[in-house]
C-alpha cells in the first residue's frame, strides 16, 4: 500500500456532501493501519461536522443468526426508507452475509445501490480472521457514514462473534429471529445474548412456526427489563411478501425518538465510543494493559463522561498512555 | 483467603487415590491466584502421574444452547458410564446450567453424586463476569480430575461464550442440539461454530421436530469435513425416556478409540494445552504481548510440539518472557 494520503479537511467536506468516491476513499483510510494514515484519519474524523456525529442520523445494528433473513429484510427496509426520502448506508460485517459472501441477494443489493439509486451506499468489511480485529474499524466507519447519510445500518451475526460486539456500538439494535428456532430465545433468557431494542421474526409467510416463535419471544420479553426502561417490541415481517416492513421501520425510529425524548441520544453515542475504545484497547493490551489504565470499568465510565473526541485520536492517546505505563511499571 | 497451602506431593497422591476432599482442595488451589498458591499448584500438577495426564481417561466437552438438555443428558450418561464401571467427574462452566444455577436437576445431580455413589464427582465453576476469566482454570482442573476419574465431562454453553473456548480443550466435544432449532445448524454451516466430534439431538420423545432437526444436521454434516478425517456422527436421544444414551456413550468412546488408533491422542492433549496457554496469554497481554512472543500461530505450534510440561509452570514461564520482552521493547 503506497497510496497517497488525502487532504483530511477536503475529504471531510466531500464525504459530508455525499460524494461516493470520497466516502469509499475515507473508509479505506479508516482501515489503513500505517501511522501516517492513522494521523490523517484522525484529522479527517475531527473535520466532520460535530452535530451530525453527536445527534445526526440513525445508527442501527441488525443482527441474528445466519439464514434468518437479515439481508433480505435489509433490502426491504432500504426500499421503505427510500420511499420516506431517507438516504441509507449499509456496513456489512457478517462473515456469512450474502452481501459480503457475494451470493445472489448481495448482487441484487449491490445492483440496487450502485445502479439507479445514488442515495444508497453499501460497503462490506472483509473478515480478517479470528484474531485480526474483524470489526475494530466499524465505529469510525459508522461515524464517517453518519456524516453523509440519514440511516447507517450495520449488519452482523447475532451470537458467537469473537471480536468487538457491534450491537453495543449503535443507537438501536434490531435482532432478526429465525422462525421455529429456540436457540436465540434460550440465549436471551439465559442472559448470554444482549437484549436488543427491536426484535423481528422474519418469514411470517411460512405461517405457524413464525407465529409460535413470535409469541415465545413476546413471553420472554415480558420477563426481560431493558436497563434503560425501553419496552422492547417484538414484530413479525416478511421480506418475501414485503409485509411488516413499514412497522419495522417505525419501531426502529420509535427507539430513536425515545432516546431523544429521554435526552439519552448523545449520551448513548458517547457510550458507544467508550465501548469501542475499551474493547479495542483490551484486544491490543489485554487485562495487563487495562489494569495499568485503572481497570476497564473505571476507564469506560471516564470515557463515557468525557467530552466527545475523535475516536482515532482518542485511541492513540490512550495507547500512548498504556505504553508509557508499561515502560514505567514494575 | 489465608488458607494454609497443602503439601503438593501429598495432595497429588491423595487426588490420584480419588480422595474427594483432596480433589476439592486441589480444585480450590488451582483457582487461587496468589503467587505462593500458583507455585504450589504448579508443583501439585507436576506430581500427578504423567501417564494419566497424557493418555489416561477421556476428557469430554458437552456443549449446546441453554435449554437443549445438556444437564439431563449428562445425568443419563452418568448412569450409563457407572453401569459400565467407569468413574465420572463433571465440571460445569455453563452460566445457564441448572448444575451451576442450582435448579431442580442440579440438586438431583448433586444428590446423586454426594449421596449413594462415591465414584461421581461434580464441581461447578462460578461465573466471574465477562472479563474475569470464566474458564481460565478449566484446563488445569480437567487435568487434576483426569488423574482420578475415567471420564471427565466439561459442560459449557455452545455459542456465544466470550472467554476461553472450552471445546478446544477436550479430547472429544459433543454438541447437544435443540430440536426444531435452526440457529445452531446455521452457525455450523456458516463456520461460526466449531464442528464438534459428536452431535446429539436431545428430546427425541417430542417426535417430528427432533427427527427433522436430526436429518437437517446429517445433511449439514455430510458437507462438513472434520479437518482430521473423523466422520462426525449425528444421533438422537431422549434423556426423559433414557433412549439413545448407550449409543451416545458408544459414539463418544469411538472418537477416543479413533484418536488412539490414529496415534493422535497424546498430540491432541498437547494441542489442548497449547490452546489454553495461548488464549490465556492473549487474555492477559493482548495482541501487543502476543506480538512480543512472535505471534500466536508460531507460539501455538511451538507449544504443541514441545514436550509436556505442567500447565501452570509453563504459563508462568511464558508470562515472565512477555514481561521481560515488554521491559526491553522499544
Image (cartoon, coloured by chain):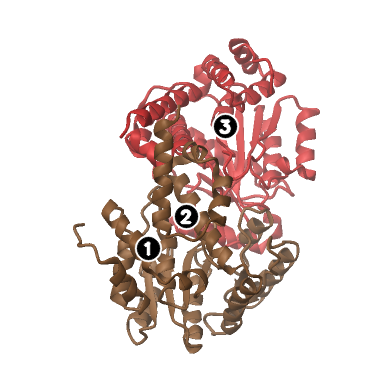
Chain colours: A brown, B red
- From the top left corner, tell me how far across and down residue B128 is, in percent: 63, 40
A246 up-or-down from B48: above or below: below
Query: Which residue is nearer to you in this view: A306 or A127?
Result: A306
- From the top left corner, tell me how far across and down residue A260 is, in percent: 61, 73
Task: Please say if the residues under marks 3 and 2 sit with CB atoms less than 8 Å apart.
Answer: no
The structure residue drawn at horizontal position 33% and vertical position 59%, both measured from the top left corner, is A31
Instruction: Indicate which label's residue lies in the foreground, 1 or 2.
Output: 1
Quarter of the image for residue B97 reads top right
Host chain of mark 3: B
Instruction: State how far apart marks 1 and 3 are (Cα).
Output: 35 Å
Mark 2, other Cα within 10 Å: few <14 / some 14–19 / many ≥20:
many
A188 up-or-down from A208: above or below: above
Task: Please say whether residue A58 is visible from this viewpoint.
Answer: yes
A250 up-or-down from B246: above or below: below
Task: Please say whether residue A206 is visible from this viewpoint.
Answer: no
- From the top left corner, tell me how far across and down residue B291 is, in percent: 34, 38
Q: Which mark is residue B137?
A: 3
- From the top left corner, tell me how far across and down residue A89 is, in percent: 42, 75
Query: Which residue is nearer to you in this view: B69 or A68?
Result: A68
Host chain of mark 2: B
Secondary structure of the residue carrying tag 2 is: loop
B315 up-or-down from B251: above or below: above
Host chain of mark 1: A
Q: Which mark is residue B192?
A: 2
Amino acid at each position: 500500500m503506497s497510496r497517497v494520503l488525502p487532504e483530511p479537511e477536503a475529504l471531510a467536506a466531500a464525504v459530508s456532501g455525499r460524494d461516493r468516491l470520497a466516502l469509499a476513499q475515507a473508509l479505506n483510510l479508516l482501515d489503513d493501519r500505517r501511522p501516517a494514515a492513522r494521523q490523517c484519519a484522525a484529522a479527517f474524523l475531527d473535520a466532520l461536522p460535530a452535530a451530525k456525529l453527536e445527534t445526526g442520523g440513525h445508527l442501527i445494528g441488525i443482527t441474528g443468526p445466519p439464514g434468518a433473513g437479515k439481508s433480505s429484510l435489509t433490502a426491504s427496509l432500504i426500499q421503505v426508507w427510500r420511499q420516506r426520502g431517507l438516504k441509507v448506508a449499509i456496513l456489512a460485517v457478517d462473515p456469512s452475509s450474502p452481501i459480503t459472501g457475494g451470493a445472489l441477494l448481495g448482487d441484487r443489493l449491490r445492483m440496487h445501490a450502485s445502479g439507479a439509486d445514488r442515495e444508497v451506499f453499501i460497503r462490506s468489511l472483509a473478515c480478517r480472521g479470528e484474531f485480526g480485529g474483524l470489526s475494530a474499524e466499524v465505529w469510525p466507519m459508522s461515524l464517517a457514514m453518519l456524516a453523509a447519510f440519514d440511516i447507517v445500518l450495520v449488519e452482523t451475526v447475532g451470537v458467537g462473534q469473537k471480536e468487538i460486539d457491534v450491537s453495543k456500538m449503535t443507537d438501536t439494535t434490531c435482532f432478526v429471529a429465525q422462525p421455529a428456532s429456540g436457540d436465540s430465545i434460550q440465549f436471551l433468557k439465559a442472559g448470554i445474548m444482549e437484549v436488543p431494542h427491536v426484535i423481528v421474526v422474519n418469514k411470517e409467510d411460512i405461517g405457524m412456526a413464525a407465529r409460535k416463535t413470535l409469541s415465545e419471544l413476546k413471553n420472554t420479553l415480558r420477563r426481560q427489563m431493558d436497563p434503560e426502561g425501553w419496552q422492547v417490541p417484538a414484530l413479525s415481517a416478511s421480506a418475501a411478501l414485503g409485509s411488516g416492513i413499514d412497522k419495522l421501520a417505525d419501531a426502529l425510529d420509535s427507539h430513536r425518538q425515545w432516546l431523544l425524548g429521554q435526552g439519552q441520544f448523545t449520551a448513548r453515542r458517547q457510550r458507544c465510543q467508550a465501548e469501542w475504545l475499551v474493547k479495542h484497547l483490551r484486544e491490543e493490551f489485554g487485562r495487563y494493559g487495562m489494569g495499568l489504565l485503572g481497570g476497564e470499568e473505571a476507564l469506560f465510565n471516564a470515557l463515557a463522561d468525557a467530552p466527545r473526541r475523535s475516536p482515532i485520536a482518542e485511541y492513540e492517546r490512550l495507547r500512548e498512555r498504556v505504553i508509557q505505563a508499561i515502560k514505567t511499571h514494575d
